[in-house]
Amino acid sequence: MGAPQLEVFSLPDTLCRWAWSRKLNPNYKKVKEESKAWLESFHAFPPKAQNAFNRCDFNLLASLAYPDASAEHLRTGCDLMNLFFVFDEYTDVCDAVEARKLADIVMDALRNPDLPRPQNESIVGEITRQFWLLARKTSVKSAQEVFIETFDTYTTSVVEQAEDRVTHHIRDVESYLKVRRDTIGAKPSFALLHLGSDLPEGFLLNPLVECISTLTIDLLIIGNDICSYNVEQARGDDAHNMVTIVMNSILVRRNV
């Protein structure tokens, strides 16, 4: 008998035919240093972890995502990307109960940025409070409301992810996309695109706008999950990843 054949899944280069050139916000270097110094002032991570965090350069991500934003709005974008990472890192190592506590802290800080945070609270609360205190100075009321609503949805979805992780639950493609469209954080990121603009009432609920938003989010999910799959599977935390979901779905269908 021959050795069992190894099954190989090929991950595509999703950007090989991408037609658009990337554009970097001209304020990148200046705003990066401001946001970087701001985040480091909280000492949210040990020095070694903070150094690894800095090499990821989430400020570059923001500067590519918001290439035409003013320096003030780019600062909001950079601070948001850094907040995302802190919240994700903290919730990645806790169960659903603790993730819910962190989510509640974050949302309370967003809704009450003028109030001091309680002593001995997770530092993510003060990071969120300062982020929003600065962001709302240069944003219109309607954009603030959309951001808070979508960020609430995001934090709730991260709690769902924590529950899945603890119970070792692997979703099917449809249910995975339902929660992943929120855990990826794209919706509050989109809200920053109109910080200074009062959009017509109902604009974001237009079916065409919703469709474009969903398709864009799905592209982000596919690209993100493919790029992060190897490191996630290496540390045994790949259940919330499209690659794992698809491979598992194929195996389930074959075994039925």
Image: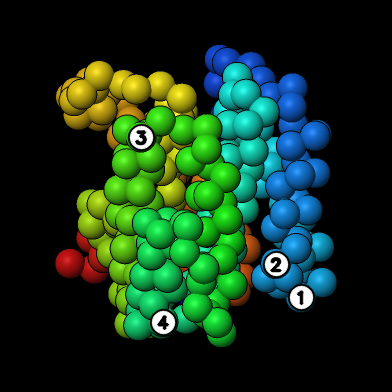
Circle 4 SS class: helix
Label 4 CA crowd tier, 10 Å (few <14, some 14–19, many 20+) = some
Task: Calculate the distance from the C-alpha at mark 1 to the C-alpha at mark 2.
Answer: 11 Å
SS at mark 1? loop
Q: Is residue 218 visible?
A: no
In the depicted structure, whether residue 105 falls above or below residue 7: below
Label 4–label 3 contact, CB within 8 A: no
Q: Nearer the viewer, residue 239 or 127?
A: 127
Crowd rating for badge 2 (residues with CA inside 10 Å; few <14, some 14–19, many 20+): few
* Residue 132, position as x, y percentages in the image: 50, 50
Q: CA distance from mark 2 to mark 4?
A: 21 Å
Q: Is residue 159 above or below residue 179?
A: below
Q: What is the spatial separation of the Cα atoms under label 4 and label 3, in whole angstroms?
A: 31 Å
Residue holding disc 2: 42
Which residue is disc 1 drawn over? Answer: 46
| Sequence-first disc among 1 and 3 | 1
- Please tell me whether residue 144 is drawn above or below residue 160 in the rendered image: above
Q: Identify the residue position indicated by label 3 in the image.
A: 141
